[in-house]
Each structure stands twice: as structure tokens, then as C-alpha cells.
Amino acid sequence: MPINTSIKHWVNKVPSRQWQKADQTLLQMGTTLPTAIAESRPLAEVHRLDLSLFVVFEEAALRISGALTRSAPNADALNFSAQQTLDEARHREIFWQRLGDSCQASGQAQATISEAILTPPLRRFLERCYEVVDSGEFIEGLVLMNLVFEGMAYPLYAYERRYWQPVDPYLAALVNSAFIDESRHVAYGAYIVNQLLQGDSARQAKVRKLCQEASLAMGEIFTYYIHKFVKLFDSVAHLHKDLFATAEFAPGRLIAATPYQEQIAVIQASIAKQHTELLARAGLI
């Protein structure tokens, strides 16, 4: 079924409806940082690290989606890339602002904290993405960005939202707002890749190979971050048992009642399942 990628449809559906509703919710919550985060050094550190990772990912997505507008092969692809660029700019801004709130409360320097979260493998992956999109390879760039980078990251948003809901509902709402956009990005991206590769078996084979290699590399990167963050999240949740008493890592499954190794296994299984389904929709498996 064709997807409506027109600017008219998107402007009516997202900024004037979805974003307006999300902004009203955030306004009602207020931006005041919860006292518990300001008073607990371990909780504040996890809060800053998590926000830093969001900022890194959104900045990369902004640069890549913006570059894709220069090589879009048709109107649908151009409209979609332009839409995604604006989405990523908004995401980067809202997470950066919340990171500023967190850093100010703990006296940390905001300017360098996001850079410190970048591991060499992630930096290399992003540099490869930049190289591809800057060279004008639209399909390959879209695959790296929407199907691999975002396609493997967006399932984590639901976990993040559930974790922060009882502690920082404002951050949970930011994550949920971004998740709605990212879900659209990966679905539209899969649709456009599938359409552009129709009837070109040689190009499809090339893109499929790139996708397999990139998915393997990104899988290793995510394995590192998932182990690191879930262990930190779990430790802090146990340190603040009252705050996280109702926090779930999956629907109906409390963090407090689930060993972090099991949390990791469930999260990775969810990523693998949803990523496989996404690639199937793109015609790459």
C-alpha cells in the first residue's frame, strides 16, 4: 500500500497535531528537574549519560538525513528526507535542552559530555554513514540510517520510556515523542528502499550485502551499549528501590524482579525480531 510522503500530509499530521499535543503535555509537566536526580549522584550520572547518548544519535541522524536531501532521486524520497531532517532537528533540540537541565543541576559541563559517550566503533560507523551520504549514494545512505542505525535503536525507546516514567516523567514524554517519529522513519525508509530497488537485482544484491555488514557492526555496538547501560540502570534502580518500585523493563515485567542479564537478553531479542521484520519489508532478506 503506497505511503503518503507529501509535505502537505505530513505538516497536517505531525507538527500541527502530534507535536502540538506532545508540547502541551510537556508544558503541563513543567521542566523542573526531579529533586531525586539533583540529590543522587549515581542517578544524576545515569540521567546525563542516557541523555548524552540520545543527543549523539540525534545529531548524527540530523546530519545524515539532511545530506540525503541532496541526492534524493524522486519527489517522495526528497519529501521524506526533508521531513526526517526536521524531525531529527527537533529531537536533538529537546534532548539537548533536557541534558542542559541535568548538567546545570549537577554542575557538569554540557559542551563535552556528549562527545565522551562516543566509542571508537560507533564513531567509525557514523563516519562511514557520513562518507556514504556525502558521496551521493541515497539508497545506501537510507539503509545505513533508517534501517540499521535507527532500525536497531528505536525498539530501545520503549524500554527507556518505561524506565524513566516513575522518576523523570518529562524525559519519558520526550522519549515517547521521539519514538513516534522514529517509528515513522523506519517504516517510510523501508518502503522507499523497497520501491527504489524494484527491478534492479544487481543493486539489490549490493545493498543487501551492505545492510548485512552494517547490521553486524551495529549489533556489536549495541551489545556494548546495552550491557553498559542496562547494568547501570539496574544498579541505580536497586539503589533507589522506592523510586523504581513500579518501573518496568518490558510490559508487565518489573526491573526490580528481573536480573539484568535477563533484561539484556529480552531487549536484544526484541531488537533482533523487529529489525528482521523491518528488513523484510524493505525486501533485503
Image: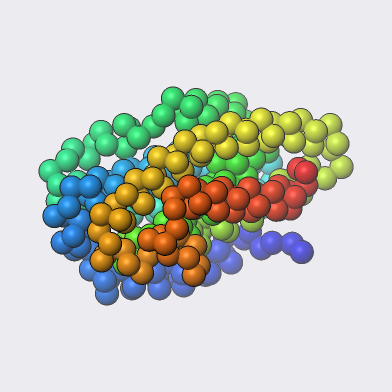
Residue 97 seen by the camera: no
At which x and y percent is residue 270? 59, 53
Query: Colour scheme in the image?
Result: rainbow
- The quarter of the rendered structure image containing the C terminus is top right
Does 266 sit above or below residue 220? below
The image quadrant where one finds the N terminus is bottom right
Q: Position of residue 120 (x, y in %)?
A: 44, 25
| Residue 9 to residue 57: above or below | below
Considering only vertical position in the picture, is 173 above or below 237?
below
Q: Residue 251, how many percent across, how many down?
A: 50, 67
Q: Is residue 56 visible?
A: yes
Q: Nearer the viewer, residue 118 or 163?
A: 163
Count the numbered circles shown: 0
Q: Residue at x 63, y 36 (%)?
A: 215
> What residue is at 12 percent from the left and 43 percent from the top?
107
Q: Which is nearer the eye, 268 or 280?
A: 268
Residue 183 appears in which quarter of the rendering?
Answer: bottom right
Residue 116 location, x and y as percent?
A: 31, 31
Q: Residue at x 74, y 62 (%)?
A: 2
